[in-house]
Each structure stands twice: as structure tokens, then as C-alpha cells.
Amino acid sequence: MGSPTPEEAEFFPTPAWCVHRLLEAVDLPAGDWIEPAVGNGDIVTAVNAVRTDVCWTANDIRPVPYLDCYQSLLQHDFGRMVSQRSWDVGISNLPFSKALPIVRGMLQLCTHAAVLLPLAWPSAHERFDFLRAHKPDVLALPDRPWDFVRDVAWFLWPSRGLGLEILPRTPREERKRDAAALETTRYRGPEQLGLLEASS
């Protein structure tokens, strides 16, 4: 097998427990939500498992399948997206290399934003000015979603004054169950989905 593509290298399916710990800790409003980097729809599915008051727009920069778990599907570079509409909540597990422009877009288009990123994300020089101007709350997950990735946290805007918080531990049984569910949710590029042929 060859080296992974950039999309494959930054595609980490989101275990449902990561989303559920966030939703237990923060009361995000009902209404229109968007997932700017929807991938295989893991976050949407996890939210829908515990909430029935969300109307979804899914977006991804690459071709992804339309799924029953959301109401509409877009294909845009969210970091450059210009839209006449807005959303109550934007939530995503972002590709690390594209995170800052996507977060900027979320803060323009969404009343609330929640993004799952490495806990060390604020440390880079190029993000310093942005994060000083737009301070998030940081809710760290004490359990790692992926064995090969450093510690992660939910970054939330606007700040509720929470600062840094540590979310509760997730029982091993729940983590194992969600990991097993994600075994079938590996990266599926457009060539595997048949979308390249369909769009040509």
C-alpha cells in the first residue's frame, strides 16, 4: 500500500462518546446546525442519537455521500465559504491543517461553534493573534479517542467563561463499543464511493 493521501492522513472518525461528553457538559441550542467537515457523518449520527431538535446541513470539501442523518448536503471549502444563511451551531472534528480558516468561517456563519482539535492547537504562532481576539472555552477529553493522536479537546465559541475544563472520564466499555462501531467507518474517498464517475 502507498502513502496515505492528505485527506486520509487527517481523517479520524469521531467516536460517539466524544460528542456525548460535550453535549452533557454544554447546553447547545436547538435549531439549524452545520458540520463543516462531515466526512462519514459520525458527529451528526452521535448528536442525533441523543437529540431530536436539530436540523442538519452537512458540508465537506470532498465528495461525500448523502445520508439520511442530515437534511441538506453542501460541497465547499468552508474556510472560503460565502453564504447568505447562518446556523445556530457549527460542530466538527476538523482536519488539523485546515482548522484555522474553517474556525474563522464558523465564527462568521454560526452563533455557536464547537471543534474537536489537539489540546496543543493554540500553541502555534500563526494562531496566537486569532485566539487572543477570539478566546474559546477548552473542554479537554481525559480519554484519547485515537491511540496514535495526542490529547484532544473541544474548543467552544463564544466563551461562556469556562476557561479550561476537564470533561468526565468515559467508561472503557463505552469506548470499546464506539471503537467497534467505527471499524466500518474508515476513510472512503470519492473513487471508493463511485462519486468521481457519477460527477464526470
Image (cartoon, rainbow, N blue to C red):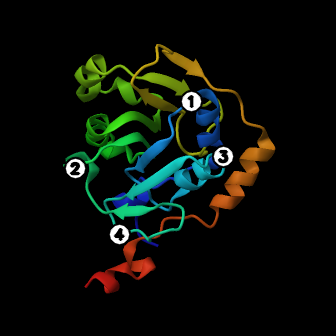
The part of the image, by quadrant, that contains residue 87 is: top left
Query: Which three-letter amino acid code belongs to the residue tagged 4?
Result: Pro
Mark on residue 27? 1
| Mark in front: 3 vs 4 | 3
* Location of residue 23 in the rendering, given as x and y in whole percent from the top left corner: 60, 35
Q: Along the line of sight, which residue is nearer the eye, 198 or 110?
A: 110
| Mark in front: 2 vs 4 | 2
- Confirm whether residue 183 shows in the render: yes
Residue located at (37% from left, 43% from top): 96
Which circle's residue, 2 or 4, is located before the other in the chain?
A: 4
Query: Which three-letter amino acid code belongs to the residue tagged 1?
Result: Asp
Do the residues under discs 3 and 4 have CB atoms within 8 angstroms? no
| Mark in front: 1 vs 4 | 1
* Location of residue 144 in the rendering, given as x and y in whole percent from the top left corner: 62, 38
Residue located at (23% from left, 21% from top): 129
Which circle's residue, 3 or 4, is located before the other in the chain?
A: 3
**Mark 2 and mark 3: span between their CA atoms?**
29 Å
1 on left or right of 169:
left
Residue that mark 3 sits on: 50
157 on left or right of 149:
left
**Mark 1 and mark 3: span between their CA atoms?**
13 Å
Which circle's residue, 1 or 2, is located before the other in the chain?
A: 1
Q: Secondary structure at mark 1?
A: loop
Do the residues under discs 1 and 2 have CB atoms within 8 angstroms? no
The part of the image, by quadrant, that contains residue 135 is: top left
Which circle's residue, 1 or 3, is located before the other in the chain?
A: 1
Do the residues under discs 2 and 4 have CB atoms within 8 angstroms? no
Q: Residues within 10 Å of mark 4 (few under 14, many from 20)?
A: many
Residue that mark 4 sits on: 63
Residue that mark 2 sits on: 83
Query: Which three-letter amino acid code belongs to the residue tagged 3?
Result: Val
